[in-house]
Image: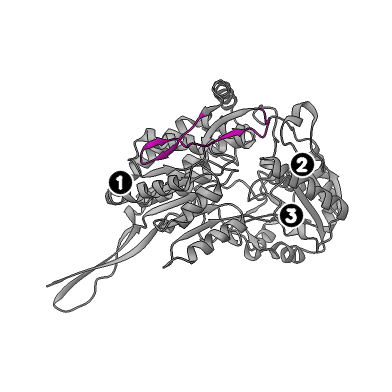
Amino acid sequence: MTFKLTYGSMFNPPQELHDNFDKALATLKETLGKEFPMYINGEERYAREKHNAYSPINTSWHLATFQKGTAQDADDAVAAAKAAFPAWKSTPWEERIALVRKFAHRIEERLYEISAAVALEVGKNRMEALGEIQEAADLILYPARIMEENQGFTVPMADDPIEGFVSKNVSVLKPYGVWLVISPFNFPTALAAGPVGNALIAGNTVVMKPASDTSWGASMMVECAKEAGLPAGVINLVTGPGLTVGNALTENPDINGVTFTGSLEIGMNTYRKFANRKYPHPVILEMGGKNPTIVSKNAILEDAAIGCVRSAFGLQGQKCSANSRIFVEEEVYDDFVKKVVGLTNKLAIGDPTLQENWFGPVINKRAYQDYANFVADLGENGKILTGGKHLTENGMDQGYFCAPTVVVDLPMDHHLWKTEMFLPIVTIAPIESLDVGMQIANDTDYGLTAGFYGSEEEAEWFFTNIEAGTTYANRPQGSTTGAWPGFQPFGGIKGSGSAGKNGGGYYYLPLYMHEQSQTRVKRA
Protein backbone atom coordinates (compact mmCIF):
# COMPACT_ATOMS: atom_id res chain seq x y z
CA MET A 1 0.00 0.00 0.00
CA THR A 2 1.29 3.48 -0.88
CA PHE A 3 2.09 5.50 2.25
CA LYS A 4 -0.48 8.22 2.98
CA LEU A 5 0.74 10.83 5.43
CA THR A 6 -1.87 11.68 8.08
CA TYR A 7 -1.64 12.30 11.82
CA GLY A 8 -2.77 8.72 12.34
CA SER A 9 -0.14 7.19 10.04
CA MET A 10 2.85 9.41 10.84
CA PHE A 11 4.34 7.16 13.53
CA ASN A 12 6.00 4.77 11.07
CA PRO A 13 6.89 6.71 7.89
CA PRO A 14 9.23 5.56 5.13
CA GLN A 15 12.82 6.77 5.53
CA GLU A 16 12.39 8.79 2.33
CA LEU A 17 10.32 11.36 4.23
CA HIS A 18 13.13 11.86 6.75
CA ASP A 19 15.78 12.12 4.04
CA ASN A 20 13.81 14.71 2.07
CA PHE A 21 13.07 16.70 5.22
CA ASP A 22 16.76 16.76 6.17
CA LYS A 23 17.71 18.10 2.73
CA ALA A 24 15.05 20.80 2.86
CA LEU A 25 16.03 21.79 6.40
CA ALA A 26 19.70 22.13 5.45
CA THR A 27 18.82 24.29 2.45
CA LEU A 28 16.47 26.45 4.47
CA LYS A 29 19.06 27.06 7.19
CA GLU A 30 21.38 28.54 4.58
CA THR A 31 18.93 31.38 3.96
CA LEU A 32 17.76 32.18 7.50
CA GLY A 33 16.91 35.83 8.12
CA LYS A 34 15.17 36.39 4.79
CA GLU A 35 12.62 39.21 4.73
CA PHE A 36 9.03 38.44 3.76
CA PRO A 37 6.60 41.08 2.50
CA MET A 38 2.89 41.44 2.99
CA TYR A 39 0.83 40.62 -0.08
CA ILE A 40 -1.87 43.10 -1.07
CA ASN A 41 -3.69 43.28 -4.41
CA GLY A 42 -1.18 40.96 -6.04
CA GLU A 43 1.80 43.08 -5.02
CA GLU A 44 4.47 42.81 -2.36
CA ARG A 45 4.28 45.47 0.32
CA TYR A 46 6.88 46.46 2.88
CA ALA A 47 6.32 48.41 6.09
CA ARG A 48 8.52 50.91 7.85
CA GLU A 49 8.68 48.77 11.00
CA LYS A 50 9.82 45.14 10.98
CA HIS A 51 9.45 42.10 13.21
CA ASN A 52 12.32 39.65 13.55
CA ALA A 53 11.16 36.11 14.26
CA TYR A 54 13.33 33.78 16.34
CA SER A 55 12.99 30.06 16.95
CA PRO A 56 11.67 28.73 20.27
CA ILE A 57 14.16 25.87 19.82
CA ASN A 58 17.08 28.29 20.10
CA THR A 59 16.26 31.95 20.57
CA SER A 60 19.49 33.02 18.86
CA TRP A 61 18.26 31.60 15.53
CA HIS A 62 16.90 34.51 13.51
CA LEU A 63 14.47 32.74 11.21
CA ALA A 64 12.95 35.51 9.11
CA THR A 65 11.87 39.14 9.13
CA PHE A 66 8.24 40.18 8.68
CA GLN A 67 6.41 43.45 8.23
CA LYS A 68 4.69 45.25 11.08
CA GLY A 69 1.66 46.26 9.09
CA THR A 70 -0.47 49.24 9.97
CA ALA A 71 -4.18 49.93 10.07
CA GLN A 72 -3.81 51.46 6.62
CA ASP A 73 -2.29 48.25 5.29
CA ALA A 74 -5.24 46.34 6.73
CA ASP A 75 -7.74 48.71 5.11
CA ASP A 76 -5.91 48.50 1.78
CA ALA A 77 -6.03 44.70 1.88
CA VAL A 78 -9.77 44.74 2.50
CA ALA A 79 -10.26 47.27 -0.30
CA ALA A 80 -8.26 45.06 -2.68
CA ALA A 81 -10.32 42.01 -1.76
CA LYS A 82 -13.55 43.97 -2.17
CA ALA A 83 -12.50 45.18 -5.63
CA ALA A 84 -11.55 41.63 -6.70
CA PHE A 85 -14.75 40.05 -5.42
CA PRO A 86 -17.13 40.73 -8.36
CA ALA A 87 -14.86 39.07 -10.91
CA TRP A 88 -13.97 36.14 -8.62
CA LYS A 89 -17.62 35.57 -7.72
CA SER A 90 -18.54 35.58 -11.41
CA THR A 91 -15.82 33.09 -12.30
CA PRO A 92 -17.51 29.73 -13.00
CA TRP A 93 -17.10 27.46 -10.01
CA GLU A 94 -15.33 24.88 -12.17
CA GLU A 95 -12.62 27.42 -13.01
CA ARG A 96 -12.36 28.55 -9.40
CA ILE A 97 -11.74 25.06 -8.06
CA ALA A 98 -9.23 24.37 -10.85
CA LEU A 99 -7.18 27.36 -9.71
CA VAL A 100 -7.58 26.52 -6.04
CA ARG A 101 -6.50 22.94 -6.68
CA LYS A 102 -3.35 24.28 -8.35
CA PHE A 103 -2.76 26.26 -5.17
CA ALA A 104 -3.11 23.12 -3.03
CA HIS A 105 -0.85 21.07 -5.29
CA ARG A 106 1.78 23.81 -5.17
CA ILE A 107 1.75 23.48 -1.37
CA GLU A 108 2.31 19.74 -1.80
CA GLU A 109 5.21 20.41 -4.18
CA ARG A 110 6.84 22.55 -1.48
CA LEU A 111 5.93 20.12 1.31
CA TYR A 112 9.40 19.65 2.76
CA GLU A 113 10.49 23.27 2.53
CA ILE A 114 7.39 24.64 4.26
CA SER A 115 7.44 21.81 6.82
CA ALA A 116 11.01 22.69 7.78
CA ALA A 117 10.02 26.34 8.24
CA VAL A 118 7.03 25.41 10.42
CA ALA A 119 9.14 23.05 12.52
CA LEU A 120 11.63 25.84 13.19
CA GLU A 121 9.11 28.59 13.89
CA VAL A 122 6.63 26.58 16.00
CA GLY A 123 8.99 24.05 17.56
CA LYS A 124 7.03 21.00 16.40
CA ASN A 125 8.69 17.75 15.50
CA ARG A 126 9.32 16.94 11.87
CA MET A 127 6.48 14.46 11.50
CA GLU A 128 3.98 16.89 13.03
CA ALA A 129 5.31 19.57 10.68
CA LEU A 130 5.11 17.34 7.60
CA GLY A 131 1.63 16.31 8.67
CA GLU A 132 0.53 19.92 8.99
CA ILE A 133 1.62 20.92 5.49
CA GLN A 134 0.02 17.85 3.89
CA GLU A 135 -3.09 18.61 5.94
CA ALA A 136 -3.04 22.19 4.63
CA ALA A 137 -3.21 20.87 1.08
CA ASP A 138 -5.90 18.32 1.95
CA LEU A 139 -7.98 20.98 3.73
CA ILE A 140 -8.14 22.78 0.38
CA LEU A 141 -8.56 19.74 -1.85
CA TYR A 142 -11.41 18.25 0.19
CA PRO A 143 -13.87 21.19 -0.15
CA ALA A 144 -12.95 21.39 -3.85
CA ARG A 145 -14.22 17.83 -4.14
CA ILE A 146 -17.36 18.69 -2.16
CA MET A 147 -18.07 21.63 -4.48
CA GLU A 148 -17.66 19.34 -7.47
CA GLU A 149 -19.84 16.58 -6.04
CA ASN A 150 -22.60 19.12 -5.40
CA GLN A 151 -22.25 20.75 -8.81
CA GLY A 152 -21.67 24.20 -7.37
CA PHE A 153 -24.60 23.92 -4.92
CA THR A 154 -27.31 24.83 -7.41
CA VAL A 155 -30.27 22.60 -6.57
CA PRO A 156 -33.60 22.38 -8.45
CA MET A 157 -36.60 22.59 -6.10
CA ALA A 158 -40.21 21.56 -6.68
CA ASP A 159 -42.12 23.49 -9.38
CA ASP A 160 -45.14 25.53 -8.28
CA PRO A 161 -48.43 23.90 -9.42
CA ILE A 162 -49.96 27.12 -10.84
CA GLU A 163 -52.52 26.64 -13.64
CA GLY A 164 -51.59 28.52 -16.80
CA PHE A 165 -48.01 29.18 -15.68
CA VAL A 166 -44.69 27.40 -15.55
CA SER A 167 -42.95 28.22 -12.29
CA LYS A 168 -39.41 26.90 -11.87
CA ASN A 169 -37.64 27.10 -8.50
CA VAL A 170 -33.93 26.76 -7.79
CA SER A 171 -31.85 27.03 -4.59
CA VAL A 172 -28.40 28.57 -5.12
CA LEU A 173 -25.57 29.02 -2.63
CA LYS A 174 -23.64 32.25 -3.19
CA PRO A 175 -20.51 33.79 -1.64
CA TYR A 176 -20.71 36.60 0.91
CA GLY A 177 -17.86 38.87 -0.21
CA VAL A 178 -14.62 39.63 1.65
CA TRP A 179 -13.71 36.91 4.15
CA LEU A 180 -11.25 37.51 6.99
CA VAL A 181 -9.13 34.57 8.21
CA ILE A 182 -7.31 34.94 11.55
CA SER A 183 -5.07 31.94 12.18
CA PRO A 184 -3.27 30.69 15.34
CA PHE A 185 0.40 30.10 16.13
CA ASN A 186 0.25 26.32 16.59
CA PHE A 187 -0.92 25.33 13.08
CA PRO A 188 0.04 28.46 11.13
CA THR A 189 -0.41 26.87 7.71
CA ALA A 190 -3.13 24.23 8.08
CA LEU A 191 -5.51 26.38 10.14
CA ALA A 192 -5.12 29.17 7.64
CA ALA A 193 -5.39 26.92 4.58
CA GLY A 194 -8.69 25.35 5.66
CA PRO A 195 -10.71 28.57 5.97
CA VAL A 196 -8.90 30.21 3.04
CA GLY A 197 -9.56 27.25 0.76
CA ASN A 198 -13.23 27.02 1.66
CA ALA A 199 -13.72 30.76 1.30
CA LEU A 200 -12.06 30.85 -2.12
CA ILE A 201 -13.89 27.80 -3.44
CA ALA A 202 -17.17 29.36 -2.34
CA GLY A 203 -16.33 32.48 -4.35
CA ASN A 204 -15.29 34.83 -1.56
CA THR A 205 -12.08 36.84 -1.60
CA VAL A 206 -9.76 36.62 1.39
CA VAL A 207 -7.67 38.71 3.77
CA MET A 208 -5.34 36.66 6.00
CA LYS A 209 -3.93 37.72 9.37
CA PRO A 210 -1.52 35.11 10.84
CA ALA A 211 -0.30 35.02 14.42
CA SER A 212 2.66 37.33 14.98
CA ASP A 213 4.80 34.50 16.40
CA THR A 214 4.37 32.31 13.32
CA SER A 215 4.04 34.16 10.02
CA TRP A 216 6.61 32.12 8.07
CA GLY A 217 4.49 29.16 7.01
CA ALA A 218 1.55 31.45 6.21
CA SER A 219 3.79 33.64 4.03
CA MET A 220 5.03 30.60 2.12
CA MET A 221 1.44 29.46 1.65
CA VAL A 222 0.53 32.80 0.07
CA GLU A 223 3.56 32.44 -2.21
CA CYS A 224 2.02 29.15 -3.36
CA ALA A 225 -1.26 30.94 -4.15
CA LYS A 226 0.60 33.52 -6.21
CA GLU A 227 2.60 30.81 -8.02
CA ALA A 228 -0.67 28.99 -8.79
CA GLY A 229 -2.00 32.06 -10.60
CA LEU A 230 -4.78 33.26 -8.30
CA PRO A 231 -5.87 36.72 -9.52
CA ALA A 232 -4.67 39.87 -7.79
CA GLY A 233 -6.72 40.80 -4.76
CA VAL A 234 -8.34 37.39 -4.38
CA ILE A 235 -5.99 36.49 -1.52
CA ASN A 236 -4.22 39.10 0.61
CA LEU A 237 -1.81 38.76 3.53
CA VAL A 238 -1.30 41.35 6.27
CA THR A 239 1.18 40.74 9.09
CA GLY A 240 1.53 42.71 12.30
CA PRO A 241 0.27 43.13 15.85
CA GLY A 242 -3.27 42.17 16.78
CA LEU A 243 -3.85 45.50 18.51
CA THR A 244 -3.34 47.44 15.27
CA VAL A 245 -3.75 45.17 12.24
CA GLY A 246 -6.12 42.71 13.93
CA ASN A 247 -8.42 45.40 15.30
CA ALA A 248 -8.45 47.31 12.02
CA LEU A 249 -9.51 44.17 10.16
CA THR A 250 -12.26 43.12 12.57
CA GLU A 251 -13.61 46.66 12.66
CA ASN A 252 -13.59 47.21 8.90
CA PRO A 253 -17.22 47.45 7.68
CA ASP A 254 -16.34 45.80 4.35
CA ILE A 255 -15.51 42.47 5.99
CA ASN A 256 -18.45 40.19 5.19
CA GLY A 257 -17.42 37.12 7.18
CA VAL A 258 -14.66 35.93 9.48
CA THR A 259 -13.08 32.68 10.59
CA PHE A 260 -11.11 32.99 13.80
CA THR A 261 -9.03 30.21 15.35
CA GLY A 262 -7.63 30.86 18.81
CA SER A 263 -8.58 31.32 22.43
CA LEU A 264 -12.11 31.47 23.82
CA GLU A 265 -11.53 34.97 25.22
CA ILE A 266 -10.34 36.54 21.96
CA GLY A 267 -12.83 34.55 19.91
CA MET A 268 -15.76 35.82 21.95
CA ASN A 269 -14.44 39.38 21.69
CA THR A 270 -14.45 38.97 17.91
CA TYR A 271 -17.97 37.53 18.05
CA ARG A 272 -19.22 40.51 20.07
CA LYS A 273 -17.59 43.00 17.71
CA PHE A 274 -19.42 41.51 14.76
CA ALA A 275 -22.68 41.41 16.73
CA ASN A 276 -22.51 45.19 17.08
CA ARG A 277 -22.70 45.75 13.33
CA LYS A 278 -25.71 47.08 11.48
CA TYR A 279 -26.83 43.57 10.54
CA PRO A 280 -25.61 39.99 11.17
CA HIS A 281 -22.48 38.62 9.51
CA PRO A 282 -21.24 35.02 9.57
CA VAL A 283 -18.65 34.43 12.28
CA ILE A 284 -16.97 31.02 12.43
CA LEU A 285 -15.14 30.57 15.71
CA GLU A 286 -12.80 27.65 16.27
CA MET A 287 -11.59 27.96 19.84
CA GLY A 288 -10.03 26.03 22.69
CA GLY A 289 -10.64 22.81 24.53
CA LYS A 290 -10.26 21.14 27.91
CA ASN A 291 -10.37 17.72 26.41
CA PRO A 292 -11.09 14.60 28.50
CA THR A 293 -10.34 10.94 28.07
CA ILE A 294 -12.33 8.35 30.02
CA VAL A 295 -10.66 4.98 30.62
CA SER A 296 -12.85 1.98 31.51
CA LYS A 297 -11.74 -1.00 33.56
CA ASN A 298 -12.37 -2.97 30.34
CA ALA A 299 -9.85 -0.93 28.32
CA ILE A 300 -6.69 -2.27 26.73
CA LEU A 301 -4.46 -0.20 29.01
CA GLU A 302 -1.43 -0.24 26.69
CA ASP A 303 -3.51 1.39 23.93
CA ALA A 304 -5.07 3.84 26.37
CA ALA A 305 -1.74 4.91 27.85
CA ILE A 306 0.04 5.47 24.55
CA GLY A 307 -2.98 7.25 23.06
CA CYS A 308 -3.22 9.59 26.06
CA VAL A 309 0.52 10.35 26.11
CA ARG A 310 0.53 11.15 22.39
CA SER A 311 -2.45 13.48 22.76
CA ALA A 312 -1.31 15.08 26.01
CA PHE A 313 2.22 15.87 24.87
CA GLY A 314 2.13 16.09 21.07
CA LEU A 315 3.27 19.61 20.10
CA GLN A 316 4.04 20.09 23.79
CA GLY A 317 0.34 20.17 24.68
CA GLN A 318 -0.17 23.26 22.52
CA LYS A 319 -3.12 21.92 20.56
CA CYS A 320 -6.70 22.94 21.15
CA SER A 321 -7.38 19.19 20.92
CA ALA A 322 -4.73 18.19 23.49
CA ASN A 323 -5.73 15.61 26.10
CA SER A 324 -5.46 17.59 29.34
CA ARG A 325 -7.79 15.55 31.64
CA ILE A 326 -7.95 11.79 32.14
CA PHE A 327 -10.55 9.96 34.24
CA VAL A 328 -9.83 6.31 35.00
CA GLU A 329 -11.99 3.69 36.70
CA GLU A 330 -10.56 2.89 40.13
CA GLU A 331 -9.93 -0.80 39.38
CA VAL A 332 -7.24 0.03 36.77
CA TYR A 333 -6.18 3.50 37.93
CA ASP A 334 -2.82 2.62 39.50
CA ASP A 335 -1.77 0.41 36.59
CA PHE A 336 -2.78 3.03 34.04
CA VAL A 337 -0.95 5.87 35.81
CA LYS A 338 2.19 3.75 36.02
CA LYS A 339 2.07 3.11 32.27
CA VAL A 340 1.54 6.81 31.47
CA VAL A 341 4.46 7.89 33.65
CA GLY A 342 6.69 5.22 32.13
CA LEU A 343 5.86 6.30 28.57
CA THR A 344 6.28 9.97 29.45
CA ASN A 345 9.73 9.36 30.89
CA LYS A 346 10.78 7.68 27.64
CA LEU A 347 9.91 10.65 25.40
CA ALA A 348 12.88 11.88 23.40
CA ILE A 349 13.21 15.60 24.10
CA GLY A 350 15.34 18.16 22.29
CA ASP A 351 15.62 19.96 18.96
CA PRO A 352 12.43 18.64 17.32
CA THR A 353 13.79 19.06 13.80
CA LEU A 354 16.12 16.13 14.49
CA GLN A 355 14.75 12.71 13.58
CA GLU A 356 15.43 11.22 17.00
CA ASN A 357 13.44 13.80 18.98
CA TRP A 358 9.67 13.78 19.45
CA PHE A 359 9.12 16.56 22.00
CA GLY A 360 10.24 20.17 21.55
CA PRO A 361 9.85 23.61 23.14
CA VAL A 362 6.81 25.72 23.95
CA ILE A 363 6.18 28.67 21.67
CA ASN A 364 7.52 31.69 23.56
CA LYS A 365 8.69 33.24 26.81
CA ARG A 366 5.16 33.90 28.04
CA ALA A 367 4.20 30.23 27.66
CA TYR A 368 7.47 29.27 29.35
CA GLN A 369 6.60 31.47 32.33
CA ASP A 370 2.97 30.29 32.39
CA TYR A 371 4.25 26.72 32.67
CA ALA A 372 6.27 27.63 35.77
CA ASN A 373 3.25 29.30 37.37
CA PHE A 374 0.92 26.38 36.65
CA VAL A 375 3.47 23.85 37.91
CA ALA A 376 3.89 25.77 41.17
CA ASP A 377 0.12 25.72 41.71
CA LEU A 378 -0.18 22.03 40.80
CA GLY A 379 2.74 21.03 42.99
CA GLU A 380 1.23 22.84 45.95
CA ASN A 381 -2.27 21.40 45.52
CA GLY A 382 -1.61 18.05 43.86
CA LYS A 383 1.24 15.61 43.25
CA ILE A 384 3.59 15.84 40.27
CA LEU A 385 4.70 12.33 39.31
CA THR A 386 7.07 13.40 36.54
CA GLY A 387 8.10 16.66 34.91
CA GLY A 388 7.31 19.98 36.53
CA LYS A 389 10.52 21.75 35.55
CA HIS A 390 12.22 23.73 32.82
CA LEU A 391 14.80 21.73 30.88
CA THR A 392 18.29 23.14 30.44
CA GLU A 393 20.58 20.22 29.61
CA ASN A 394 22.03 19.47 26.17
CA GLY A 395 21.53 23.00 24.87
CA MET A 396 17.87 23.21 25.84
CA ASP A 397 18.67 26.28 27.94
CA GLN A 398 18.84 28.16 24.64
CA GLY A 399 15.12 27.62 24.02
CA TYR A 400 11.79 27.28 25.82
CA PHE A 401 11.85 23.64 26.89
CA CYS A 402 9.43 22.44 29.59
CA ALA A 403 9.26 18.86 30.83
CA PRO A 404 6.10 16.86 30.04
CA THR A 405 4.21 16.79 33.31
CA VAL A 406 1.83 14.24 34.85
CA VAL A 407 -0.23 15.34 37.87
CA VAL A 408 -2.41 13.30 40.25
CA ASP A 409 -4.22 13.91 43.55
CA LEU A 410 -5.49 17.31 42.41
CA PRO A 411 -8.76 18.17 44.21
CA MET A 412 -11.68 18.00 41.79
CA ASP A 413 -12.76 21.53 42.68
CA HIS A 414 -9.37 22.97 41.64
CA HIS A 415 -9.69 25.50 38.83
CA LEU A 416 -7.06 23.83 36.62
CA TRP A 417 -9.45 20.94 35.94
CA LYS A 418 -11.43 23.45 33.86
CA THR A 419 -8.79 25.98 32.75
CA GLU A 420 -7.12 25.49 29.38
CA MET A 421 -3.37 25.60 30.06
CA PHE A 422 -2.17 24.94 26.47
CA LEU A 423 1.02 23.39 27.83
CA PRO A 424 2.49 19.88 28.33
CA ILE A 425 0.54 19.17 31.52
CA VAL A 426 -2.03 16.42 32.05
CA THR A 427 -4.06 15.75 35.20
CA ILE A 428 -5.36 12.26 36.04
CA ALA A 429 -8.06 11.24 38.54
CA PRO A 430 -9.73 7.96 39.56
CA ILE A 431 -13.50 7.62 39.10
CA GLU A 432 -15.87 5.24 40.86
CA SER A 433 -17.91 4.66 37.68
CA LEU A 434 -18.10 5.63 34.02
CA ASP A 435 -21.21 7.70 34.73
CA VAL A 436 -19.27 9.81 37.22
CA GLY A 437 -16.46 10.21 34.69
CA MET A 438 -18.91 11.36 32.04
CA GLN A 439 -20.47 13.90 34.38
CA ILE A 440 -17.07 15.41 35.18
CA ALA A 441 -15.92 15.26 31.55
CA ASN A 442 -18.94 17.29 30.42
CA ASP A 443 -18.73 19.77 33.30
CA THR A 444 -16.69 22.40 31.41
CA ASP A 445 -17.24 25.40 29.16
CA TYR A 446 -15.52 23.56 26.32
CA GLY A 447 -16.66 20.79 23.99
CA LEU A 448 -13.99 20.20 21.36
CA THR A 449 -12.53 16.68 21.48
CA ALA A 450 -12.85 13.67 23.76
CA GLY A 451 -11.54 10.12 23.95
CA PHE A 452 -12.62 6.80 25.41
CA TYR A 453 -11.09 3.36 26.00
CA GLY A 454 -13.26 0.37 26.87
CA SER A 455 -15.59 -2.22 25.37
CA GLU A 456 -17.52 -1.68 22.13
CA GLU A 457 -20.78 -1.42 24.06
CA GLU A 458 -19.26 1.18 26.39
CA ALA A 459 -17.94 3.10 23.39
CA GLU A 460 -21.49 3.49 22.06
CA TRP A 461 -22.53 4.82 25.48
CA PHE A 462 -19.62 7.28 25.30
CA PHE A 463 -20.60 8.62 21.84
CA THR A 464 -24.21 9.03 23.00
CA ASN A 465 -23.39 11.02 26.11
CA ILE A 466 -20.19 13.00 25.54
CA GLU A 467 -20.54 16.72 24.82
CA ALA A 468 -17.85 17.22 22.19
CA GLY A 469 -17.65 17.72 18.45
CA THR A 470 -14.72 15.39 17.64
CA THR A 471 -14.65 12.06 19.43
CA TYR A 472 -12.53 8.89 19.40
CA ALA A 473 -12.80 5.44 20.94
CA ASN A 474 -9.97 2.95 21.50
CA ARG A 475 -7.49 4.87 19.37
CA PRO A 476 -3.82 4.33 20.30
CA GLN A 477 -2.76 6.85 17.63
CA GLY A 478 -4.17 9.59 19.87
CA SER A 479 -6.94 9.72 22.45
CA THR A 480 -8.18 13.21 21.53
CA THR A 481 -5.97 14.37 18.64
CA GLY A 482 -5.27 13.49 15.03
CA ALA A 483 -8.28 14.54 12.94
CA TRP A 484 -7.74 14.56 9.17
CA PRO A 485 -9.75 16.16 6.34
CA GLY A 486 -12.20 13.72 4.83
CA PHE A 487 -11.65 11.26 7.68
CA GLN A 488 -12.49 13.01 10.98
CA PRO A 489 -14.26 16.38 10.60
CA PHE A 490 -12.77 18.64 13.29
CA GLY A 491 -14.73 21.13 15.39
CA GLY A 492 -16.45 21.68 18.69
CA ILE A 493 -19.51 22.87 20.56
CA LYS A 494 -20.11 25.12 23.59
CA GLY A 495 -17.05 27.34 24.15
CA SER A 496 -15.04 25.46 21.52
CA GLY A 497 -16.87 26.52 18.39
CA SER A 498 -19.74 28.50 16.93
CA ALA A 499 -20.49 26.86 13.60
CA GLY A 500 -21.85 23.46 14.57
CA LYS A 501 -20.16 22.08 11.44
CA ASN A 502 -16.61 20.76 11.47
CA GLY A 503 -13.64 21.69 9.31
CA GLY A 504 -12.52 19.00 6.90
CA GLY A 505 -16.05 17.62 6.86
CA TYR A 506 -18.92 17.39 4.41
CA TYR A 507 -21.00 20.25 5.83
CA TYR A 508 -18.28 22.88 6.33
CA LEU A 509 -18.05 24.48 2.87
CA PRO A 510 -21.68 25.78 2.85
CA LEU A 511 -20.84 27.92 5.90
CA TYR A 512 -18.99 30.21 3.51
CA MET A 513 -22.07 30.77 1.33
CA HIS A 514 -25.60 32.08 1.79
CA GLU A 515 -28.68 30.65 0.15
CA GLN A 516 -30.73 32.42 -2.50
CA SER A 517 -34.07 31.03 -3.63
CA GLN A 518 -34.77 31.81 -7.29
CA THR A 519 -38.24 31.52 -8.84
CA ARG A 520 -38.73 32.01 -12.58
CA VAL A 521 -42.31 32.23 -13.87
CA LYS A 522 -43.65 32.38 -17.43
CA ARG A 523 -47.08 31.85 -18.92
CA ALA A 524 -47.74 28.37 -20.20
| 448 over 235 or under it: above or below | below
Residue holding disc 1: 94
Apparent side of residue 438 relative to residue 280 in the rendered image (left or right): right
The extreme front residue here reads 48
Label 3 residue SS: strand
Disc 3 from disc 1: Cα separation: 45 Å
Q: Quadrant of the C terminus?
A: bottom left
Q: Which residue is drawn at 68% across and 51% down?
A: 474
Residue 304 image position (x, y, % from top left): 73, 48
Residue holding disc 3: 325
Residue 60 image position (x, y, % from top left): 67, 28
Q: Which of marks 1 and 2 is in front?
A: 2
- Circle nearer the N terminus (3, 2): 3
Q: Residue at x 30, y 44 (%)?
A: 95
Point out the stretch of residues depicted in magenta: 35-60
Residue 147 image position (x, y, % from top left): 37, 51
Residue holding disc 2: 404
Q: Residue at x 64, y 60 (%)?
A: 446
Asked whether 44 falls inside the magenta stretch, the response is yes
Residue count near mark 3 (Cα–Cα under 10 Å), binned few <14, some 14–19, many ≥20: many
Label 1 residue SS: helix
Residue type at numbered disc 3: Arg
Residue type at numbered disc 2: Pro
Observer-nearest of 276 and 102:
276
Asked whether 131 falls inside the magenta stretch, the response is no
Observer-nearest of 88 and 327:
88
Taking the image as drawn, is residue 175 in sight? yes
- Circle nearer the N terminus (3, 1): 1
Residue type at numbered disc 1: Glu
